[in-house]
Image (spheres, rainbow, N blue to C red):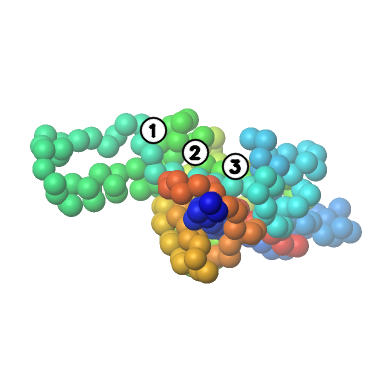
Amino acid sequence: MPETPRRRVLRRTAVVTVALLVAATGTTAAARKQPPVADLRADVNQDGRVDVAGSSDEAGEEAWRPGRGAVFLANVDDDSRRCRLRPGDLDRIDPAVDERLAACHDAADERVNGVRDEADLAPLRVPPLAVGDQASGRLEVPAAQRPYVRLFVRRDGALRALRGPLTARELRAGVEPALEGRDVCAVVEHRAGAVTGPGPQAPGRAAGPARPASAETGPRPGALRKPSVSA
């Protein structure tokens, strides 16, 4: 008797693009001979660190594929245990309670809530650049993707929500940004008898071919593309 074919669930990974642009006005004498390149690095080889000194995270950085490419997670846990149940919250079915509890998580504010929260962010690095005093830099995420992620940068020893440009002093010292996933959105598409989804779906292109998987649900990593833009 022929085996009944099992339905396959195909899943895809959403992509977020982060771009670095540097206005190298007033570069140093050395930089005028060889203009600086705005080099934004990420954990492309997925070893848990960003290689700034070497090239282990350089190969294949422009195209994400399973096993090679920077990833980020939706930071929707509560590491500092600040979200509290109120008396009676679990005693009745109340959509308002569900909405209130679902809205209370680490990505709901613009703060990094301790060391454990910082570990949930995807690290990025900008190696030191030889630029002059009037230079500035800008980290950007496409407008359609901004509701789904947040950029932080380390300033005065702490990660702070990124506002405004990167200064010449920061560019010369090297910059330590971090990317936070703010939400998980399940999108299910029916296509030729297969199902695509669920998972974190920020607007953007799917990275890599869809892969057969079990019918499990739940959040999965998003993919990070990080083109470096010449100054």
Q: Quadrant of the C terminus?
A: bottom right
Under mark 2, the amino acid is Asp
Asked if the residue at tag 1 contacts the one at tag 2, i.e. Cβ–Cβ closer than 8 Å, the answer is yes
Q: Relative to residue 64, is residue 173 depicted above or below?
A: above
Write the residue at 58% across / 62% down. 206
- Residue 133 percent location from the top left of the image: 70, 54
Of the residues tagged 2 and 3, which is closer to the observer?
Answer: 2
- Residue 1 percent location from the top left of the image: 53, 51
Q: Relative to residue 20, is residue 116 depicted above or below?
A: above
- The residue pinned by badge 2 equals 120
Viewer can see residue 216? yes
Write the residue at 75% across / 62% down. 230
* Residue nearest the viewer, comparing 73 with 189: 189
* Residue nearest the viewer, comparing 170 with 67: 67
SS of the residue under disc 2: loop
Return the disc, 3 or 1, that comes first in the chain's sequence. Answer: 1
Under mark 3, the amino acid is Pro
Disc 2 and disc 3: Cα gap in Å?
A: 9 Å
SS of the residue under disc 3: strand
| The label number, if any, that marks residue 123 in the structure image | 3
Write the residue at 45% across / 35% down. 117
Under mark 1, the amino acid is Asp
